[in-house]
Amino acid sequence: MFKKQTSFTLNDETKTLIIGTAIQNNIVGKVFEGLNIDASALEGSHTKTLHTLGKLPSKKVVLIDEQALNDHKKRPELINGLGVFKEDAIVLLDAFDEANMELLGEAIGLSQYTFDEFKTKKTEKGTVYYHTASDAAAFENGLVMADATNFTKDLVNRPYNALNAEKLGDIAKELESIDNVSVKVLGKKDIEKMEMGAFLGVNKGSTDEPKLIHVTYEGDASNQEKTALVGKGIMFDTGGYSLKGVQSMPSMKMDMGGAASVLGAIKAAATLGYKANISAIVAATDNRIGDDAILPDDILTSANGKTIEIISTDAEGRLTLADALWYAQQEGATRIVDIATLTGSVIGALGDTITGAFSNHSEFYQTFEKTANEAGELVWRLPIGDEHRKSIETPFADIKNSGGRKGGASIAAAFLEHFVDEKTPWIHLDIAGTAFDSTQGAKGPMVKTMAKLFE
Ligand code: BES
Ligand code: MN
Ligand code: ZN
């Protein structure tokens, strides 16, 4: 929990002090003097906890290296080093450089994240107070960004038996408490009415209803631009009859990572009151086997009328995205970013720290890339070539849903391209590598970048 504290004296002995290293600052100066140290106490690490041993009223001081705070490569290690504060702590904002306030709030917010919903023994957590003589808005904006990323991580970390399509819809509905946000959650009947045959096909093997989740934020009524963030929402991916193996199925609760990131991004942008019109759209279902599940060779008709031959029921994300992309345009999107844990192939190409990107619009992509760079999130553009487009041709339908093993991330993008009007600026993000780590858990990729697109 984070709380603003209006008055503060160094005589407060109940809280751990958190300070930067700007020696010209009054408080930092007093603490350094009291402990008889200087900034070199950090000894090359990004954070340091000092026990004051009676030299100051508070028992502990945490030093934060502000240069590392500002460095995208070092920041994750710094956040990790801070860890969860077991006891109450107070961040003395005036003991940091003004320019670092937002990053500081974000780092502190991210550092307190734990996922212990399913642990019988919960992590001990103190309250984190923050104090400044002036206004704390920038720090609080950083806290909002961290809170949105933590929200995304929670969604991804929850297993299927705690989070199916319906529950995701319920959680999305709660975003309505934010100003200018409205949420629609459409059920199977409405999805059938819209003839979303591709989306419904994926859901056929399931015992749970599909949900089409549509969150709208209207933050700039005078602006014609409406950006849709479309997230892959496969609540669990067994592969369907093209069943995944014992090795590759665990962790597939993460297959709604795109959905979680778009919900986090719109939550941040709306809470921060950015001047923009945004929607977050998710076609949510699990992908599993069942008496009625789709089979390879089946042909589905998507909402935009194109027919799709199923080669692999494990290439299900692109099927749900096809109809979600159609819906986004139907709802008047002038620009689209989709984000999906789409292909194992992108992990082979870029590893698990860089998100793969595709776009039909270089100017929009450049804006996006610049935003990602400023946010410190790694992204690399990959091509959609004619050979990829050709690989999904089939004699039996308009296209097929898999085009072989080589260049799988580009083939998936070539598939999605069929469902986006070529005049609509579009970016496709493949986060199969960046969404989740089996030891670290969810990573919350692109929440900050997508939100900051609208700052
Ligand atoms: N959800 C998977 C992609 C994935 C793999 C995400 C590993 C995270 C980690 C996706 O639905 C899938 O199964 N893709 C197949 C596509 C293939 C059948 C064309 C893949 O990448 O193997
Ligand atoms: Mn799959
Ligand atoms: Zn999948």
Image (spheres, rainbow, N blue to C red):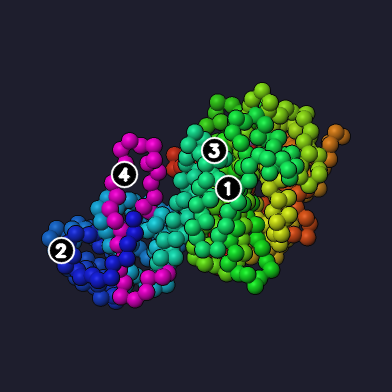
Quick check: is 113 in the magenta stretch? Answer: yes
In the image, is residue 425 above or below residue 397? below
Using the numbered discs, state the Cα–Cα distance from disc 3 to disc 2 in whole angstroms.
50 Å
> For mark 1, what is the residue?
259
Q: Position of residue 93 (x, y in %)?
A: 33, 69
Q: Which residues are magenta?
A: 111-138
Classify mark 2: helix, strand or loop: loop
Mark 3 or mark 2, earlier in chain: 2
Mark 1 or mark 2, earlier in chain: 2
Residue at 53% over, 50% down? 173
User: Label 3: few (<14), some or many (≥20) within 10 Å?
Assistant: many
Q: Position of residue 97 (x, y in %)?
A: 37, 72
Residue at 64% over, 25% down? 290
Can the viewer see residue 391?
no
Residue at 71% over, 29% down? 294
Amino acid type, residue under disc 1 in the picture: Ala
Classify mark 3: helix, strand or loop: loop
Q: Is mark 3 within 8 Å of ligand 3?
A: no
Can the viewer see residue 396?
yes
Q: Is residue 229 left or right of residue 394?
A: left
Closer to us: mark 1 or mark 2?
1
Classify mark 4: helix, strand or loop: loop
Classify mark 1: helix, strand or loop: helix
Corner quadrant of residue 307: top right
Q: Is mark 2 within 8 Å of ligand 1?
A: no
Q: Is residue 296 left or right of residue 65?
A: right
> For mark 2, what is the residue?
57
> For mark 4, what is the residue?
123
Closer to us: mark 4 or mark 3?
3
Labelled disc at residue 164? 3
Quick check: is 66 in the magenta stretch? Answer: no
Closer to us: mark 2 or mark 4?
4
